[in-house]
């Protein structure tokens, strides 16, 4: 594959209640995705645990721990980068929703704690309060891959355009959001948000959901997908377990930015997005 290209695989994994089965399944699917030529492989939010406030304390572990160590071993065995969806992380008396990123030598190269807590109330449809037992992270997380800087957010983080914009200002060309939207906000906003973030920043956006389990307490929307810097959905699936692939092309990012040069046309004299 040309140096300007990178094949990514997103794993829309069926997550159940048995942690060890989830970990084993993740490793099997990473093997399959590596066999499909992927250089970077991403898992969904909460790949080792059902998504839900009652599960977070029960499934939480330290990092490294059982679930994340398995990702490091898989990254090394199959010679790929792994963006490990997320796991409920325990540190001291706090819990976080945390994504780890692993390099082909099996080393952890980044750790992102979800920054924005998913606390919403859509009356009669969905009420969720992640902050009842999770704490937010306070950092941006980027990773320098051999030919592409990537930015990591987790699910609800995708709703915040400033965060994506900061990542693009930092030089990211691909944003990855392990996420688990639901049957209310999924059909309404999942694709729209990905396309918005991609188009605003002229970057690739990948969002990785668990497969839908209709019997789960929190039912995931699925529809794992990749959007191009032109705002087109270039790879997607429905709600079943699946691996989807896309070839991220950095030359295409440059081309889109040359054709419609909004990133150079910003009126920094009138407004700015800055970090604190
Ligand atoms: N896990 C999450 O953060 C869910 C976010 C979500 O569903 C949304 O609508 O935002």
Image: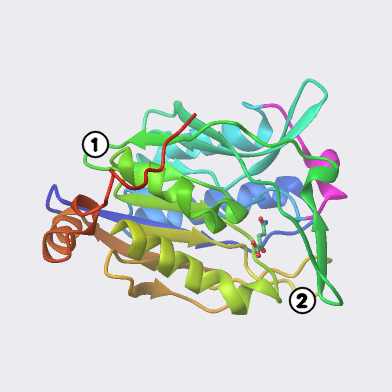
Coloration mode: rainbow
**Front residue of this view, candidates 80 and 199:** 199
The residue under the point 48% across, 76% down is: 237
Ligand 1: does it lie within 8 Å of the C-beta at label 1? no
Residue 124, above or below 100: below
Q: Is residue 55 magenta?
A: yes
Q: Earlier in the sequence, mark 2 or mark 1?
A: 1
Q: Which residues are magenta?
A: 52-62
Ligand 1: does it lie within 8 Å of the C-beta at label 2? no
The crowd level at tag 2 (other Cα within 10 Å; few <14, some 14-19, many 20+) is few
Mark 2 — residue?
A: 214
The residue under the point 79% across, 28% down is: 94
Report the Cα–Cα distance between label 2 and label 1: 40 Å
In the rendered structure, the answer to whether residue 196 lies left or right of residue 69 reads: left
Q: Which mark is residue 146?
A: 1
Q: Which quarter of the frame holds ligand 1? A: bottom right
Secondary structure at numbered mark 1: loop
């Amino acid at each position: 594959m040309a140096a300007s290209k990178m094949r990514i695989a997103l794993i829309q994994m069926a997550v159940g209640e048995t942690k060890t089965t989830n970990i084993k399944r993740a490793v099997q699917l990473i093997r399959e995705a590596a066999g499909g030529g992927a250089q970077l492989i991403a898992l969904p939010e909460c790949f080792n645990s059902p998504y839900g406030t009652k599960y977070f304390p029960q499934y939480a572990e330290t990092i490294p721990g059982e679930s994340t160590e398995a990702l490091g071993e898989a990254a090394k065995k199959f010679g790929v980068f792994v963006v490990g969806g997320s796991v409920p992380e325990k540190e001291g008396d706090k819990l976080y929703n945390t994504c780890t990123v692993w390099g082909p030598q099996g080393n952890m190269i980044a750790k992102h704690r979800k920054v924005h807590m998913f606390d919403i109330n859509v009356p009669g449809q969905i009420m969720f309060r992640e902050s009842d037992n999770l704490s937010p992270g306070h950092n941006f997380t980027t990773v320098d891959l051999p030919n592409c800087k990537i930015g990591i957010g987790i699910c609800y983080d995708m709703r915040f355009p400033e965060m994506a914009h900061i990542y693009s200002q930092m030089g990211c060309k691909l944003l990855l959001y392990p996420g688990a939207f639901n049957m209310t906000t999924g059909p309404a906003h999942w694709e729209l948000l990905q396309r918005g973030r991609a188009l605003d920043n002229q970057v690739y956006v990948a969002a990785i959901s668990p497969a839908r389990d209709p019997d789960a307490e929190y039912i995931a929307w699925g529809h794992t997908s990749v959007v191009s810097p032109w705002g087109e959905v270039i790879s997607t699936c429905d709600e079943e377990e699946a691996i989807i692939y896309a070839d991220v092309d950095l030359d295409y990012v440059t081309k889109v930015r040359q054709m419609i040069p909004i990133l150079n046309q910003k009126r920094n004299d009138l407004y700015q997005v800055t970090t604190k």
